[in-house]
Amino acid sequence: MTDEKNDKKPAKVTAKAPEDKEFPKLKTLTDKEMYNLVGKFLQKAIPIRGAKLKIVKGLSNRTPMPKAPYVLINIVDENRLSTSETRYTDKYKILWSRSQITMTIMFVGNESIPALRMAKSFTIRFDDAWASEQFEQYGEPFYPLYSDEVKIERSFVNAEDQYEDVCSVDVYFEYHPEFGICENSAKEIIMDVIGE
């Protein structure tokens, strides 16, 4: 003989959350996408005749540097500038915030294309309204702000223990990433209740 009370299963409640594909596309950028935007701008801002400007995006271990002239871009900092702001869709809450991205750009020159000339060519154009017009064409939430003064690196030694012609500058961008939240934790609740 079995005990009927022990045969009954407890009530079960499950929640069905929205599927990932239903979530709206958010405006965000990866580091690689930021590097690509700055790389596009560099190609326009530093016109070089008789040589192709190589752009190294981010530092990687065990990656040899190319032969000069080249430019190295590296993100060094991200700081939040304000509290987040909110917009809503019919199902979702979208948060976005303002951040400041700091990049160090290093210019490595040679006898025919000096690093200082490349750096000055870049900063003059970056600090002008022309830079905002260029980045606006890309249609991304990434906006040029300003640059610091160019620094001449007098003791930069390459892999062959040779001094190289190097300048660097820190540049600043405003970035507006979006983050999504489901307005409700679930859109459907299913309850299985055993009657007595």
Image (cartoon, grey):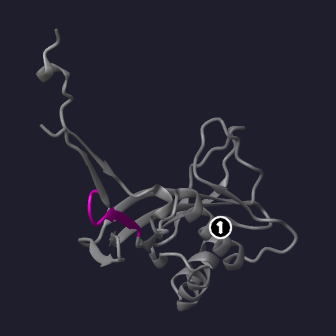
> Looking at the image, is 83 positioned above or below residue 54?
below
Residue 46 is left or right of residue 96, and the answer is right
Quadrant for the N terminus, please. Answer: top left
Furthest-right residue in view?
A: 50
Q: Is residue 34 visible?
A: yes
Q: Quadrant of residue 118?
A: bottom right
- How many residues crowd around disc 1 within 10 Å: few (fewer than 14), some, or many (20 or more)? some
> Residue 82 placed where, x, y %?
26, 73
- Residue at x-position 60% and y-position 43%: 60
> Residue 155 placed where, x, y %?
56, 49
**Nearer-the-camera pick, 159 or 134:** 134
Residue 58 is left or right of residue 48, and the answer is left
Q: Look at the numbered disc 1 and give the secondary structure of its residue.
A: helix
**Nearer-the-camera pick, 167 or 179:** 179
Which residue position holds label 1? 39
> Residue 20 placed where, x, y %?
47, 56
> Looking at the image, is 77 positioned above or below residue 116?
above
- Residue at x-position 51% and y-position 60%: 21
Residue stretch rendered in magenta on the structure: 177-186
**Nearer-the-camera pick, 161 or 169:** 169
> Looking at the image, is 66 positioned above or below residue 3?
below
Q: Is residue 117 visible?
A: no
Please check the rendered image and state whether residue 180 is part of the magenta-colored stretch, yes or no: yes
- Residue at x-position 49% and y-position 78%: 144
- Residue at x-position 14% and y-position 21%: 4
Query: Tag count in the figure?
Result: 1
